[in-house]
Image (cartoon, rainbow, N blue to C red):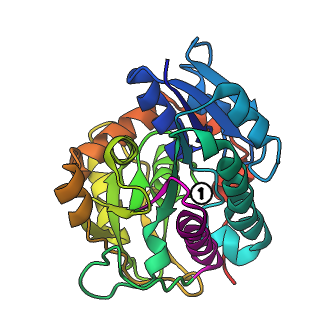
Amino acid sequence: MKKIIVTGGLGFIGSNLVDLLLKKNFFVINIDKATYSSNLYNVKEFKSSKKYKYIKIDIKDKKIYNIFLKYKPLGIFNLAAETHVDRSIDNPDSFIQSNIVGVYNLLECFKKYSKNNNSKLIHISTDEVYGDILSGRSHEKYPYNPSSPYAASKAASDHLVSSYVRTYSLSAIVTNCSNNYGPKQHPEKLIPKLIYNIMNNKPLPIYGKGTNSREWIYVKDHCEALIKVFLKGKIGEFYNIGSNTNLNNLQVTKELLKSSKKMMKLGKKVKINFVKDRPGHDIRYALNSNKIRNKLNWYPKTNFKKGILLTLKWYFENKSYYKSLSKKDIINRLGKG
């Protein structure tokens, strides 16, 4: 059976990717150091599968190499990362450690392991490396201009991967994706936080005036794209993965409220509450994903309206998910600067 390693597989995108890989009959080794945003709840439906193995380890640990040797994976998807912009404003250190030092160690271990085989490393990054895109859409050759310590740490990791491809002929590909949403996302992020507040009759906090625009993609569409890049992508290339659909935070909130009303009676406190903006908050991200569409024939299948309903349905059916998290991680406001 073909073996794949997913780093960060207890997290949001990672656990959805593990699920999809298992359904496509891969044997999946999930490597995760189990931080606050990791959650065993995310893998409960397949933790007893004979095609699944979880190993608790940090990607900074040199013993990762021994895991490569033992399991001999055909592919490694690197999703292990600190990802919350507000946390990176409060304390950038863990972002530097995971997203730069961790990726450096992963590359060194993979370089040694992949000398005598055809394995590939897919490094998953973000549209935030491009910074503010006030008009148009950023393509793969667009200059990096990160605004937050989080985005800067991801930009650094992308450059590291790219340099190893050029210097050491490493078999690696970088993907840059737009904002993901869907089941199993930690409620420090906008959509699951709003869902939590809707379910618990709390006000809905929106930064500034709610005009910050993001390109939203349903997580399962993103995971399909990652597998396509692994199977058909060209070594050394960068691929943008996006939906081509931008919505500002106010539009997202209104769509959520509209869909929530189909599932429950909203409490009196469920109202939009504008809060102080985060420092350096980018106004707009927008990706040009023509390359992956034209070269690999990938297209997103889930529009925002359908995706939000699927997301809401999952959270409503998995209310115990929120109980598996620390309450302060759900409620506390971070990144005030």
- Give the residue furthest to the front: 116
Please identify the quarter of the rendering in which residue 143 is found. bottom left
Q: Is residue 181 left or right of residue 97?
A: left
At horizontal 66% and vertical 60% (from top left) the residue drawn is 82
At horizontal 23% and vertical 51% (from top left) the residue drawn is 296
Q: Is residue 331 left or right of residue 143?
A: right
Instruction: Tell me where residue 110 appears, x and y as whole percent.
Output: 66, 48
Instruction: Tell me where residue 258 appears, x and y as whole percent.
Output: 26, 52
Please identify the quarter of the rendering in which residue 148 is found. bottom right
Amino acid type, callout 1: Glu
Compare residues 126 and 239 and report the one nearer the observer: 239
Magenta stretch bounds: 148-175
Compare residues 234 and 10 and report the one nearer the observer: 234
Compare residues 302 and 325 and report the one nearer the observer: 302
Instruction: Tell me where residue 198 appears, x and y as whole percent.
Output: 46, 49
In the rendered image, is residue 68 in sight?
yes
Dot 1 lies on which element? loop
Q: Main secondary structure of the magenta part?
A: helix
At horizontal 50% and vertical 40% (from top left) the residue drawn is 118
Structural crowding at the residue carrying mark 1, measured as other residues with C-alpha within 10 Å and reported as few (<14), some (14–19) or many (≥20): many
Q: Is residue 66 left or right of residue 7?
A: right
